[in-house]
Image: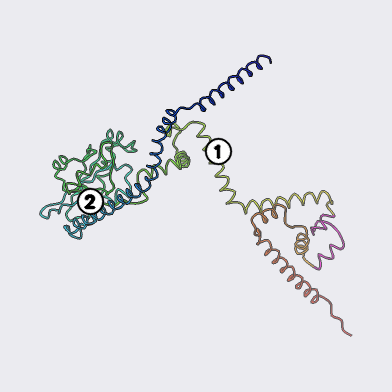
Amino acid sequence: MNLFKKRKRKRDGDNSSGSDAEEGTRGSATPDAVSSREGSSSPFRKKRRAVSHGGDTTEAEAAEAAAAAAASKEAFEKRELELDTALPEALRKYRPSGFSLNIPPTDRPIRIYADGVFDLFHLGHMKQLEQCKKCLPNVVLICGVPSDKVTHKLKGLTVLTDAQRCETLMHCKWVDEVIPNAPWCVTPEFLKQHRIDYVAHDDIPYVSADSDDIYKPIKQMGQFLVTQRTDGISTSDIITKIIRDYDKYLMRNFARGATRQELNVSWLKKNELEFKRHIQDFRSYFKKNQETLNSSSRDLYFEVREILLQKTLGRTLYSRLTGSPNYDDEENEEDKTKKPARVLAARRRRLIRDKSPATQFAQSYTGEPLRKQSDSASASASASASASDSDSDDTADSDAPTTYT
C-alpha cells in the first residue's frame, strides 16, 4: 500500500509541475510564437473557404455532365435513325444497337452461323435456331460447338460431352451443318474460311476475360444478326432446379433401381431418404383410407362394447336388451307372435349402437359427418319396422274370429 501511495504522489507532483510550466509558457508567449500560430492556422482557413465554395463547383459539374449526357443521347438517337433508314423495314429488327447491318445477298444461299455450348438442349435453343433459320430467305444454318476443354476452362462444367452436344444438334431440323471444336471467339478469318455471311446471337454484350464484348468486331463489320432470348428457360435454370430438388430426384432414381454407388450417395443419406419415403407413403395411405379407418375403429368399438356388456349383464339380460331370440320368456314369446324378431332386434340394437369416441373425434377433426349412410340405413330400418308393424296389425285383425249376435 505504501508503494502505491508513493507512486501516486509522484504522479501528482509531475502533473503539477507540468501544469506550472505550461502556464509559464502561455504567460510568456513571444510575438514570434503568436505570429507562427497565426501563420499555421491560415492554411486551414483557406481550406474552409474552398469547401464553402465547393458546393457551387459540384452543382456546375453536375449540370455540365447532364448536358453532355443529353447531347450524347441525342446524337445516338440520330445515328440510330440514320442506320434504320439505310435498311429495309424487314431487316431493321435484326440490326444490333449502335452498329450497321450489311444487305444480304440475293443470288445465293445465305450462310448464318450460330455458336454456343448447347448443353442439355432445350426449348430456348430450339427457338433461337428457328429464328436464325427463318430470319432471311434461303438460309443455310451452321452451328459451332466448342470443345470440352475450352468450355470447361472459360464457362464451366457441362453435363454432356462435346460429341453428344454435336450429335444432338444434328437431329434438330433447323440445323444444316455442325462445326465441332469451334473457336470461343469468332474471328474474321473463321468467317472467311467457312464462307459465313452473318453471325446470329442476342444483342446483350458477351463479356470475356480480355474483351467487354466478344462479338464487337463482327458487329463493326456489319455481319451480326440479332436474335431474341427465350425468358424463363436456360441450361443454368435447369441445373438449378435439379440441385434445389436434389432429394426428390435421388428418391426418384432409387425407386427406379439405381444404387447409391451409381449416385455417389452415402449409406446415411440413403437411409434418410428411405425414412422420408416411408413417412410420405404413410401420409398418403392415411389420407386415402381415412374413411375406412374411422369405420373400422367404430365397428371394433361396438364389438368390444357388446362383449363387455354380455359379460357384465349376463346372457339372459343381454339377450333381452338386444332382442336376441335365444332366451325363453313368455313376454318375449308374446312379442315374437305379434312382431318379427328382426324388427325387435333392430329397434333394441339401435338403442345400444351410438357414435363411438373415435367417430366423434374424426367428426370434430374433419368438420363433417363421416357416416351419413348409417343414418339412412337407420331411417330405412325404422321405415321397414313401421311397415312390418302395420302389416302384422292387419294380419292380426284379419285372423281374428268373427262373432255374430
Q: Amino acid at mark 1?
A: Phe
Q: Is residue 373 left or right of residue 132?
A: right
Residue drawn at point x = 75 percent, y = 73 percent: 391
Check residue 218 for magenta coloring.
no
The residue indicated by pointer 1 is 275
Q: Residues within 10 Å of mark 1 (few under 14, many from 20)?
A: few
Which percent across, then down, holds residue 79?
A: 20, 55
The question of residue 332 being in magenta is answered with yes
Mark in the foreground, 1 or 2: 2
The residue tagged with tag 1: helix, strand or loop? helix
Disc ID at residue 192: none
Residues in magenta? 317-338
Height in image: 215 above or below 388? above
The picture places residue 381, in percent across and down from the top left corner, at 71, 65
Q: How many marks?
A: 2
Nearer-the-camera pick, 281 or 194 = 194
* Quarter containing the N terminus: top right
Q: Which mark is residue 98?
A: 2
Q: CA distance from mark 1 to mark 2?
A: 60 Å
User: Magenta region's main secondary structure?
Assistant: helix
Q: Does residue 315 appear left or right of residue 42 in this picture?
A: right
Q: Quadrant of residue 3?
A: top right
Up/down of 399 relative to 161, above or below: below
Q: How is the image coloured?
A: rainbow
Give the x, y percent position of residue 199: 21, 47
Which residue extends farthest right? 405
Secondary structure found at label 2: loop
Nearer to me, 69 or 323: 69
